[in-house]
Image: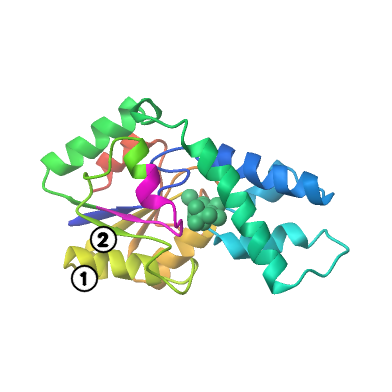
Amino acid sequence: MNLKAVIFDLDGVICFTDKYHYQAWKALADRLGIYFDEVINNRLRGVSRMASLEIILERSETAYSQAEKEAFAEEKNNTYRKLLEQMSPADLTDEVRQTLQELRRRGCRLAIGSSSKNTKFILGQIGLGDFFDAIADGTDITRSKPDPEVFLLAAERLGLAPADCAVVEDARAGIQAAKAGGMTALALFGDAAHCGLEDVNLSSFADILNHI
Ligand code: G6P
Ligand code: MG
């Protein structure tokens, strides 16, 4: 395909923080007496923290103020950060590490495009703090996926045109964002796979090597 760069989503692609997001949201939902399960959790992939909270509050009878919602989001994030502290370079699989190294060996530029404001903390935990050529994350953007803002910023920071970039995503919202930004969309796991908007369905992380 003659692509010059790969922009990776973080949560659910490079590492599996989904279970920690779930545990942290579940603790908040339980405390507030709101039903929450793994199916609802699937709707939170690629969605910003505040938008995730709104999805959880859909099942609440109480109308909370903006200040209460901000406190809930902070409570969830504090629980989530404690869970992230358990992460280490052992949470990066050999498959992901070797695939990233092989892409770099082939001259491909590598970036992260994530809605998470915890991106740099997570990359540090798994030993990739200095690895990527560019990072665009939730601290840089005002519009979350499916808006292409985070991926366009990653491409800009790489100094490349969107058409030169592929995006790897596990979220349908992320595939929508990649296509809206004019990039090649590679779907891996989650609700991205076979969502109908992707250019390629990857069979595994290492399968990226067959499409770049
Ligand atoms: C990623 C995850 C979402 C999460 C979002 C914000 O996109 O897939 O589940 O809500 O980041 O994460 P943050 O770490 O900023 O709360
Ligand atoms: Mg994701």
Q: Residue 195, can we see it?
A: no
Question: Residue drawn 39% across and 57% down?
Answer: 199
Numbered mark located on residue 9 in the image: none
User: Which quadrant, please, contains the N terminus?
Assistant: bottom left
Secondary structure under badge 2? strand
- Amino acid of disc 1: Ala
Is ligand 2 closer than 8 angstroms to the Cβ of mark 2?
no
Mark 1 CB in 8 Å range of ligand 2? no
Which of the two residues, 11 or 83, is positioned nearer the viewer here? 83
Observer-nearest residue: 66 or 187? Answer: 66
Q: Mark 1 highlights which residue?
A: 161
The amino acid marked with disc number 2 is: Cys
Image point (28%, 64%), residue name: 154
3 to the left or right of 31: left
Residue 165 is marked as 2
Image coordinates for residue 50, horizontal then vertical, percent: 60, 64
Q: What stretch of residues is rendered in magenta?
A: 111-122
Task: Please tell me which residue is depicted at 69% across the width and 73% down the height of the picture.
Answer: 66
Vertical position of residue 172 compared to residue 147: above or below: above
Seen at 82% across and 48% down, the residue is 35
Q: In 3D space, how far apart are the residues under numbered discs 1 and 2 (Cα atoms)?
A: 7 Å
Q: Secondary structure at mark 1?
A: loop
Q: Position of residue 51 (x, y in %)?
A: 62, 65
Counting the numbered discs, the total is 2
Asked if the residue under mark 2 is in contact with the one under mark 1, i.e. CB atoms within 8 Å, the reply is yes
**x and y percentages locating residue 97 in the rendered image:** 27, 32
